[in-house]
Amino acid sequence: MLSTKIVIVIFDITSLFTFVMNKFLKLSFIAVSVIVLGGCGMRGGPEGDVIGAQDRPEFNPQEVPYGMVPCPGGTFHMGQTDQDIAATMSNLNKQVTIRGFYMDETEITNNEYREFMNAIREDSLDILGEEYVMTRLYPDTTVWMRDFTYSMGDPMMQYYYTHPAFDNYPVVGVDWNAARYFSDWRTKRKNAFLVEDGQAAMPDFRLPSEAEWEYAARGGRDMVTYPWGGPYLRNAKGCMLANFKPGRGDYYSDGYSYTGPVGQYFPNDFGLYDMAGNVSEWCADAYYDAAVPVVWDLNPVYNNDNEPRKVVRGGSWKDVAYFLETGTRNFEFEDSARSYIGFRNSMIMLGDRQRSR
């Protein structure tokens, strides 16, 4: 009887030992599996929950880039808002939607472009070559003489880009390709600082699309003739609202014979200066007479690398009022620099900023 009990006890101890070992081995296998699978890219928190990839760059809510203003997304009627005097039929009305973006408060100035040129000559002259830098990127100052027959443009050619008196004037003599090169340089310069500081890179600085430009020029006012609203070119005090050519042979009634310093006239409702007059501005789009019905109605842009004509908007110091209208389209060849064409940058907004109500 006693022997039987000893056998039973030994059997129970053996069963218990086997049970414990099985549990131990099973738990060990699970632990090893978690480690192995985790090493293969499975994401999981302490409890096996999906918590997202770790060690991501820091990104705070997107701040307004220096020198830019926010243009909240919205819907507007793109196209002519007054008589199509030239009968171009190139900008018929079309309702489109634009996502939020940022745009330079003013046109790029001589001194801002000089910072770019100094950096290129210091860092990239050996790579690009002096001839390329001086003929393709450096502002063509001869435009002040070439653009106008029998006009004494010599003083402007000599001083406009080089003299400190014109530092805050919009840069001109820069073609479409050079404007894009500036935009790329500006992006790399800013992001090199951010990445070194452990922050996420910002979106690219770039030329605005034609639709973005027109939307920004209207400043939230749909179907207006000029960026400031109604059809008049003077305010209630009789002061001109832009730098343009008010009448035949009259360049000075607005205060400036040629270009003027940026930001001298009232901004529109988005806070943007000189969206009409001073200098016309390059856009990213290729020019096409029938672009309006072709492009999509959400963030439209007409890309065509085979089309050398690029969109120019806004009118300039030498233009009559028709070219200042928000719905007037114009173009220039991408490799042509002019004394009346400059540019400004835009940047997409990561997450639409809602319009204040």
Image (tube, rainbow, N blue to C red):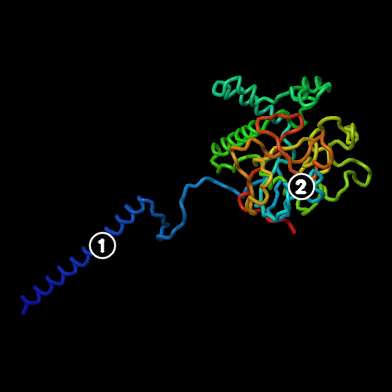
Locate residue 95 relative to residue 248 in the image: left or right. Answer: left
Expressed as whole percent of the image width and height from the top left, the position of residue 112 reads 70, 31
Identify whether 23 is placed above or below 7: above
As drawn, which residue projects farthest toward the front? 87
Q: Amino acid at mark 1?
A: Lys
The residue shown at (61%, 25%) is 120
Q: Looking at the picture, tell me which residue is in the foreground, 226 or 204.
A: 226
Locate residue 13 relative to residue 204 in the image: left or right. Answer: left
Q: Amino acid at mark 2?
A: Gly
Helix, strand or loop for disc 2: loop
The residue shown at (61%, 20%) is 131
Dividing the picture into quadrants, the one containing residue 273 is: top right
Quarter of the image that includes the N terminus = bottom left
Quarter of the image that includes the C terminus = bottom right
Question: Which sits earlier in the primary sequence, circle 1 or circle 2?
Answer: 1
Closer to the eye: label 1 or 2: 2
